[in-house]
Image (cartoon, coloured by chain):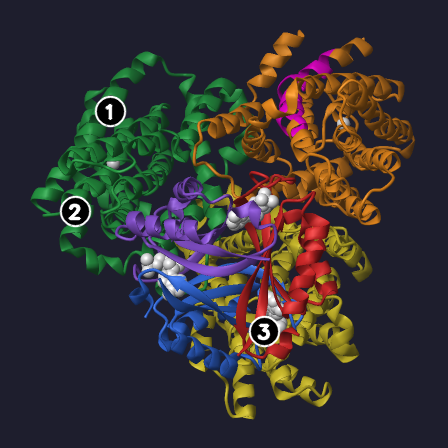
Chain colours: A orange, B green, C yellow, D blue, E purple, F red
Amino acid sequence: MEIFELVRINLLSPMVLAFVLGIVATLVRSDLRFPEELYTGLSIYLLLAIGMKGGAELTKTTLNEFFMPALVTLLLGVAIPSLAYLILRRLGRFGVADAAAIAAHYGSVSVVTFAAVQTFLELQQIPYEGFMPTLVAILEIPAIIVALLIARVALGQVGHWGEVVRDLLAGKSIILLLGGLVIGLLAGTSGLEQVAPLFVDPFKGALTLFLLEMGMVAARRFRDLRRVGGFLIAYGILMPLVNGCVGIWLGNLAGLSYGGAVVLGTLAASASYIAAPAAVRIALPQANPSYYLTASLAITFPFNLAFGIPLYFGIASWFYS
Amino acid sequence: MEIFELVRINLLSPMVLAFVLGIVATLVRSDLRFPEELYTGLSIYLLLAIGMKGGAELTKTTLNEFFMPALVTLLLGVAIPSLAYLILRRLGRFGVADAAAIAAHYGSVSVVTFAAVQTFLELQQIPYEGFMPTLVAILEIPAIIVALLIARVALGQVGHWGEVVRDLLAGKSIILLLGGLVIGLLAGTSGLEQVAPLFVDPFKGALTLFLLEMGMVAARRFRDLRRVGGFLIAYGILMPLVNGCVGIWLGNLAGLSYGGAVVLGTLAASASYIAAPAAVRIALPQANPSYYLTASLAITFPFNLAFGIPLYFGIASWFYS
Amino acid sequence: MEIFELVRINLLSPMVLAFVLGIVATLVRSDLRFPEELYTGLSIYLLLAIGMKGGAELTKTTLNEFFMPALVTLLLGVAIPSLAYLILRRLGRFGVADAAAIAAHYGSVSVVTFAAVQTFLELQQIPYEGFMPTLVAILEIPAIIVALLIARVALGQVGHWGEVVRDLLAGKSIILLLGGLVIGLLAGTSGLEQVAPLFVDPFKGALTLFLLEMGMVAARRFRDLRRVGGFLIAYGILMPLVNGCVGIWLGNLAGLSYGGAVVLGTLAASASYIAAPAAVRIALPQANPSYYLTASLAITFPFNLAFGIPLYFGIASWFYS
Amino acid sequence: MTKLKLVTIIAEAILEDRLVRELRRLGARGYTVTGVVRGEGAHGSPVIVDPGGQNVRIETLVSAEIASRIGAYIADHYFSDYAVIIYVLEAEVLRSDKYL
Amino acid sequence: MTKLKLVTIIAEAILEDRLVRELRRLGARGYTVTGVVRGEGAHGSPVIVDPGGQNVRIETLVSAEIASRIGAYIADHYFSDYAVIIYVLEAEVLRSDKYL
Amino acid sequence: MTKLKLVTIIAEAILEDRLVRELRRLGARGYTVTGVVRGEGAHGSPVIVDPGGQNVRIETLVSAEIASRIGAYIADHYFSDYAVIIYVLEAEVLRSDKYL
Ligand SMILES: Nc1ncnc2c1ncn2[C@@H]1O[C@H](COP(=O)(O)O)[C@@H](O)[C@H]1O
Ligand SMILES: Nc1ncnc2c1ncn2[C@@H]1O[C@H](COP(=O)(O)O)[C@@H](O)[C@H]1O
Ligand SMILES: Nc1ncnc2c1ncn2[C@@H]1O[C@H](COP(=O)(O)O)[C@@H](O)[C@H]1O
Ligand code: NA
Ligand code: NA
Ligand code: NA
């Protein structure tokens, strides 16, 4: 299929449309509000569901197949924040704290983008490795630590460092993702079946609901777009493209399947908006949250959701033909 | 089937029984409380689900079939509040503000009543037009504006008028209903299928849960029944009957199917308890909320849910035989 | 099957694993928080779902079969708190208020433990009587009243007594359980089918999510374990075993099926953590909540969930062979 | 502007209904409840009876006389067995007859 | 430490957006909203328009002059038709220029 | 009744745990947190890091001496980088030894 056709199909999925609806609701200043507790509940659900499904599929994987992909994922976790930092400092002329803060976000991952690419591949009926949620967990944290380390070296200090690293490792997304994985692994396929009517079947619907809220959250950041400037807007679109290609390439080298490489590319391309902001706000309080939140939530996330995923799918096809 | 039998079947549906349970829980002063966030979450879900399902079915409709029903719906939106206002002023001897406030509620619609009639028809396996949710959106707002306009003319002023109209058009029920419609329309039947395990299959169950809470909300208004007086109680039962017949008759004229006419009749008969109260409280603060909330929530809503829907179904059968 | 094998299977179910995950999340001081509203929403759901399913099955039962089991359940409601009180006073050397408070908890039941044993039996494909939820409702309240009466006699007074009894009878778990039963009974199997995609199919998944939160709640009480002392810890494990055996034995006498006796045993063994704490805190404010909450939530609940249920299943098999 | 007392009670959530009833009986003409609030004090973390429940904050604007009546009542009935605190601020109000 | 006024408004939730806008216009440099809060007063239980909505509490630290301007404005525009109360406390702040 | 200080801190929700720990260290014997609260001030809308998080209000009843210690500490450690305000009210309490 052609890339344009893929983008069109993707744009007309209920998930992307719900995201757009969220944006529209905010722009017309609707009184539509998502209860914070529903947001929290849905994100617990999504993380756990992703983990459990991955865990149940892990029972079919050998550790062997897993080793190389895990290694290149770790590599991505070091390479992307370093590259991102350099670009932001040199080309973007950002200060140390702001550059490191943004780099931490682009090195880490967005779980919802992961869920979206999973859904996209399932609709295209392209299989991918069952251990991909494990790679999400592997990619989420190291990049943040690397970026904070860079700032620590460049600035001579970073406040509350030990606490920040501990909080990262015990962060809710890690706990739920890895916890779900272990549950899925131990309970196996038959265990997953018991809870499938909640954790598998309605997953796409729950993601749709969640993206409605994400659209509202993203749109609330739109008015900051002017303030953050043209460079960051371009950065929020081009950096994912670069990272996505690197991810696909490394995935291919590591022996991932076509679907697996698309997922790893998307993960590399995605920017964190849960783990990274919380860590950065504590460890680098002097960094301006407008920069990293706007870039991650209002630029890169929508871009990946609407265009990035089909693009990476198209790009990966060059590596796999 | 006979009307009595229909009423009996309807009363024994899980939805109506859950509503009764909510009433009982409040009357025995149980500590059962529905978290407000669950209420909000469920109403977001119901509106979006109704919209999406309608939208997916719209793909099968021609604009042609839609034109006349839309027109009579708009007509209802002007006629009902005017009629309601006159009756309340002349027979009920209400003041201008109170009469206009109540008229706004009876001109507008209750989305949950719509969901209930939909469910009722599905159980009776009576088809209805896919564009009915569109008619809900069409009927919701104009009647409120008409009623407020009447008050504005009669009183010489209405506070915050422009803002009120804007808020109405960007209100959450319109956004979610129309937004869902567009999502369903663009994503099509195959898109709806992806999210059906969340947005279609559990719909009746979610409605049941919501009606449990609605029962508690309605029952909390019961002690106001004495205060509002006999006229308003009679009004809350007779006005829906009149409006329901008018709705069925116009639906029939506009060429709607049997099921479609029942739905339009029920919409006409239903009274708003979301959009109208919010608008009226801002635009007509001098109107006594006890009147309009009690009539709408504690009289008309339960009446329609328990008796109205099967009645309109029976009445419509005279037009379609 | 051997008991060890049953325990192993039970420990690897998604429900128990989710409970363990909740404990782990708390112990590593994760920022994972369950919104209180989600907790409340899920408990409303579980109670209603249990009731409705039981009600629909009640349509297949004669009152005849129900009489003896109901009677022995009432007997348990008097016997267990009395026995528990004596043991706590004599062997545990607890004061009157503390002993009565704890006895109230062990006489009453834990609905989630009931849900867990239901799920366990379904996986083992062992049938049980449809009226078991009715027995939950019968066993929940009397034991609390008996325990409070004991304290009232021993202390010469109990504050707010009438109010407490009224609150117990109108408590949310009774309202939802009995309400659900009546809904299920009146709507029948066909009514239940309409709402099955919400109230039946995802039940195990919802229970899993709920147990994740219960694990966090239980773990937050772990640091009180040292404070409550060795006696209460032993009590929290041995008392359920005794009560479980008595329950199975009486169930067998009353003519319950194998599955039914396992359920009654588990009910007898379980300790309340909703109705009892609320009543006790008001009626016996001088009792130390650390004792009863820790014993019930941090000892007996996890024990029953992980080990008790398969044990009672094994023990009951001796009575039924 | 008239000077009144703003009495604030922070108490276990389970006491809300009862406290509100008693405030009324002691002469308060209105009240506002904020909850759930979290907190710690002499009793450590609040005694969470229902795993959901925590503390609530109840505020009432009253005359100085009723304020001290409420203070005495709460001290008598709640301080020994429950995690409850009470404090009083000086507030200026419009329409003071509304509260008296 | 400088002395400022802490103005508290308790109002029907539906008024939140409008009140915040008006506070800004009357000169408040910031505000904090706590909501939903429950309560009862002269109007009985709060007028719950959306079955979800109740009251909100809006607080703003301002100079004495702006405090009385706000008081007058609220009395004029809200007391007759809405369930709204307002009271003022004396507060000490650091960085007082932030609020003036 | 004894006079004490009611110190109120309004801060980004992400700081809650840290602030509570520090209050304890500075001598507070208890505290109450209300959250989430919404608000705006010099930093505009609160910096919502997790899309869910907003502000929290932390209150603690302490002696005048500890109140000013807390004020100085917060000013030193939070004013430059975080959206945090602090103010102090005069409160009367029963059982003042509980807070000292
Ligand atoms: N010094 C304090 N400042 C603010 N709130 C307090 C203080 N002490 C206690 N509280 C609140 O009052 C509740 C009961 O206090 P206590 O009875 O001391 O455990 C606590 O959970 C806190 O919410
Ligand atoms: N005396 C009072 N003390 C504290 N809050 C009050 C008082 N009177 C009224 N309120 C609050 O203000 C709201 C509106 O009051 P009212 O206009 O008197 O109905 C009530 O719902 C309460 O939340
Ligand atoms: N004048 C004020 N009155 C009440 N609350 C304020 C005021 N200024 C700031 N705040 C609160 O303190 C938070 C942080 O303030 P700021 O650092 O000025 O952005 C805001 O989000 C508000 O919740
Ligand atoms: Na990335
Ligand atoms: Na109508
Ligand atoms: Na028991």
Q: State whether residue C306 is above or below residue C153.
A: above
List the residue tagged with mark 1.
B74
Observer-nearest of A306 and B4 = A306
SS for callout 3: loop
The location of residue B258, given as percent across then percent down, is 26, 27
Residue drawn at x 69%, y 31% is A292
Asked if the stretch drawn in magenta spans residue C91, the answer is no
Residue drawn at x 74%, y 66% is C222
Left/right of residue A317 with respect to residue B286 in the rendered view: right
Discs 1 and 2 lie in a common subunit:
yes
Q: Is mark 3 within 8 Å of ligand 1?
A: yes
If you read the primary sequence from the N terminus, does the residue marked by circle 1 or circle 2 appear first? 1
Q: Which residues are magenta?
A: A295-314
**Chain for mark 2?**
B
For badge 3, the amino acid type reads: Ala
**Which mark lies nearer to you, 2 or 3?**
3
Left/right of residue B175 with respect to residue C252 in the rendered view: left
Observer-nearest of F13 and A47 = F13
**Which mark lies nearer to you, 1 or 3?**
3
Q: Specify whether residue B213 is in view.
A: yes
List the residue tagged with mark 3.
D83
**Chain for mark 3?**
D
| Residue positioned most to the top | A2
The location of residue B98, given as percent across then percent down, is 19, 45
Residue B235 disc label: 2
Q: Quadrant of residue B104?
A: top left
Q: Specify whether residue A123 is in view.
A: no
| Gap in angstroms between the C-alphas marked 1 and 2 | 23 Å
The location of residue F97, given as percent across then percent down, is 64, 79
Q: Name the image quarter holding the N terminus of chain C.
A: bottom right
Discs 1 and 3 lie in a common subunit:
no
